[in-house]
Image (cartoon, grey):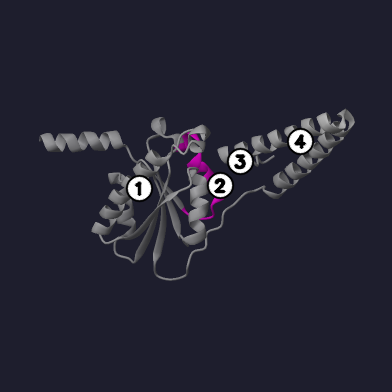
């Protein structure tokens, strides 16, 4: 069975709904008696089972359709955060756009902490870092003649991709991550989910920022 809870936001909404339902049952029990509380609990459980059945039945398999435009422009959706200004990613995009008309949309999912952090609005630092990396990437790509736009996306990379495809008719997707041993996106199967769910060609680019920094240091010393 397909799991309808796709991300942390879905789990949080489910917890809130369960909490509200439990509070209603308790309140009705105190006001009208145990019998009415039991009846309400049974009704809510029945509704919940019905909704769960409809969601799981209607969402297998899940897919996200792209809507490419039939013209001579190559449109590439690039999804990256910490690696947005990485040399390997910029070279990959430059190679794909060389010698042809090309448009790039760079989406950087905001890096935020826990759900408690989000409720406390403690996300400014994550947004600022995403914008800073995007600005460096946009500057570098425009420097080699690539037409690019950029925006901060949903903290969930797969949701950010889905949102971007609603407004950008991509022909392909490029996802950039850190190496496997340091990548939270790979740990959470962002790349594999995209391959399964999005009906567009996808390329995974691994950027080793530590290696890039070491190379830059050696060049400056030399």
Q: Taking 217 as reference, is 167 left or right?
A: right
Q: Which residue lies furthest to the front in this view?
A: 31
Q: Which of marks 4 and 1 is in front?
A: 4
Mark 2 vs 1, N-terminal side: 1
Asked if residue 64 can be seen in this view, the reply is yes
Residue 103 lies, with reference to residue 50, above or below; the image says below
> Who's the residue at 56% across and 57% down the image?
65
Q: Taking 220 as reference, is 22 left or right?
A: right
- Residue bearing the label numbered 1: 131
Gap in angstroms between the C-alphas marked 3 and 2: 20 Å
Q: Where is residue 112 in the image (x, y as percent from the top left)?
A: 44, 38
Labels 3 & 1 near each other (Cβ < 8 A): no
Gap in angstroms between the C-alphas marked 4 and 2: 40 Å
Labels 4 & 2 near each other (Cβ < 8 A): no
Q: Residues within 10 Å of mark 2 (few under 14, many from 20)?
A: few
- Residue bearing the label numbered 2: 196
Asked if residue 177 can be seen in this view, the reply is no
Q: Which of 129 and 19 is in front in this view?
A: 19
- In what element is the residue under mark 2? helix
Residue 156 lies, with reference to residue 97, above or below; the image says above
- Give the residues in magenta: 185-201
Labels 4 & 1 near each other (Cβ < 8 A): no
- In what element is the residue under mark 4? helix
- Residue bearing the label numbered 3: 10
Kindly indicate the quadrant of the structure image that contains residue 8: top right
- Residue 131 magenta-highlighted: no
Q: Residues within 10 Å of mark 3 (few under 14, many from 20)?
A: few
Gap in angstroms between the C-alphas marked 4 and 1: 43 Å
């Amino acid at each position: 069975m397909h799991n309808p809870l796709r991300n942390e936001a879905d789990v949080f909404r489910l917890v809130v709904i369960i909490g509200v339902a439990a509070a209603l049952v308790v309140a009705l029990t105190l006001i009208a008696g145990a019998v009415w509380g039991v009846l309400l609990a049974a009704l809510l459980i029945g509704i919940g089972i019905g909704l769960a059945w409809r969601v799981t039945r209607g969402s297998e398999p899940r897919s996200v359709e792209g809507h490419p435009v039939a013209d001579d422009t190559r449109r590439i959706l690039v999804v990256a955060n910490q690696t947005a200004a990485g040399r390997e990613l910029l070279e990959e995009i430059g190679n794909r756009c060389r010698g042809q008309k090309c448009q790039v949309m760079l989406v950087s999912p905001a890096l935020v902490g826990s759900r408690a952090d989000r409720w406390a609005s403690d996300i400014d630092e994550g947004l600022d870092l995403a914008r800073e990396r995007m600005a460096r990437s946009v500057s570098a790509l425009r420097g080699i003649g690539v037409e690019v736009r950029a925006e901060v996306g949903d903290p969930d990379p797969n949701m950010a991709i889905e949102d971007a495809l609603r407004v950008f008719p991509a022909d392909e997707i490029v996802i950039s991550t850190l190496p496997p041993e340091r990548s939270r996106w790979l740990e959470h199967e962002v790349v594999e989910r995209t391959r399964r769910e999005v009906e567009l060609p996808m390329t995974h680019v691994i950027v080793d920022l530590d290696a890039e920094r070491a190379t830059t240091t050696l060049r400056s010393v030399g």
